[in-house]
Image (spheres, rainbow, N blue to C red):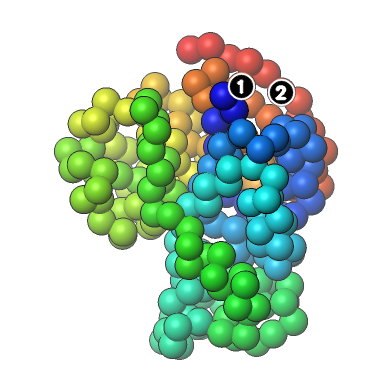
């Protein structure tokens, strides 16, 4: 049996992702769930998506769709009314990493990768989404707006009716530490803002963390 590992928002920080993978050393049986937001803000969205496509050949990668990734897809599919807002939302860094001036000019392989990202992934004891969830609704009925966009600052949900533990990203933690409420774990530890890129093995809650340059903070085992 391989490990189950979740990784928080990457936001174009390739060196952080590479450094994290050096610590994790994934093997083919590992399930690695990336919680979305591969694009925008950081300097190398292109490199991040290239790396993730390669990672699919090394382990069982389960990429989720983040709101930034969703915007890239929508604009590439004739969503020009969103373009200016996206540029101010971190999109300029994405275009610069590709050397183009519009998302529709991104490599088709990269757009295809984003298009096959999942909105939700679940195991026997956990479920994984980018942003948030409605605790009273079954997982297959969750709205896309909530899964991809709703911040925990706007609404911190209670335990889900399935009894499974939620693992999310999206809401950057100002403390730069993992938020663990027992029924909900948030792994966005603000890499783009000078914090950490975080990976957590489940159910042990072992952590690996690196900074933007991929330098490790160290690993620890925490049993709640």
The location of residue 28, given as percent across then percent down, is: 66, 38
Give the number of marks: 2
Q: 180 left or right of 15?
A: left
- Identify the residue position indicated by label 2 in the image: 219
Q: 127 left or right of 76?
A: left
The answer to the question of whether label 1 and label 2 lie on touching residues, with beta carbons closer than 8 A, is: yes
Residue appearing at x 32%, y 28% in the figure: 164
The location of residue 15, given as percent across then percent down, is: 79, 51
| Chain-order first, disc 1 or disc 2 | 1
Q: 180 left or right of 110?
A: left
Question: Residue 206 — which label?
Answer: 1
> Which is more toward the observer, 107 or 70?
107
Q: Is residue 17 above or below residue 167?
A: below
Q: In the displayed image of the protein, which residue is found farthest to the left?
A: 136
The location of residue 127, given as percent across then percent down, is: 38, 36
Asked whether residue 122 appears in the rendered view, the answer is yes
> Which is more toward the observer, 141 or 72?
141
> Which is more toward the observer, 193 or 10?
10
Residue appearing at x 21%, y 50% in the figure: 141
Residue appearing at x 68%, y 30% in the figure: 208
Q: Is residue 69 above or below residue 105?
A: above
SS for callout 1: strand
Quarter of the image where one finds residue 145: bottom left
Q: In the displayed image of the protein, which residue is found farthest to the top?
A: 223
Residue appearing at x 51%, y 73% in the figure: 72
């Amino acid at each position: 049996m391989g490990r189950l590992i979740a990784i928080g928002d990457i936001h174009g920080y390739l060196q952080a992702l590479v450094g994290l993978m050096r610590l994790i050393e994934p093997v083919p049986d590992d399930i690695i769930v990336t919680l979305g937001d591969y694009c925008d803000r950081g300097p190398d969205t292109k490199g991040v998506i290239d790396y993730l496509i390669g990672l699919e050949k090394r382990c069982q990668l389960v990429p989720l769709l983040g709101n930034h990734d969703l915007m890239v897809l929508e604009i590439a599919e004739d969503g020009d009314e969103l373009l200016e807002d996206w540029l101010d939302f971190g999109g300029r860094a994405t275009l610069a990493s590709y050397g183009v001036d519009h998302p529709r000019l991104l490599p088709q392989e990269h757009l295809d990768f984003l298009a096959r990202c999942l909105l939700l992934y679940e195991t026997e004891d956990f479920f994984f989404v980018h942003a948030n969830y409605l605790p009273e609704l079954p997982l297959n009925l969750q709205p896309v707006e909530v899964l991809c966009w709703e911040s925990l600052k706007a609404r911190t949900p209670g335990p889900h009716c399935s009894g499974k533990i939620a693992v999310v990203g999206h809401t950057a933690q100002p403390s730069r530490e993992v938020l663990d409420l027992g029924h909900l774990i948030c792994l966005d530890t603000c890499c783009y803002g000078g914090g950490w890129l975080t990976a957590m093995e489940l159910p042990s809650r072992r952590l690996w963390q690196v900074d933007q340059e991929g330098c490790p903070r160290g690993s620890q085992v925490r049993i709640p």
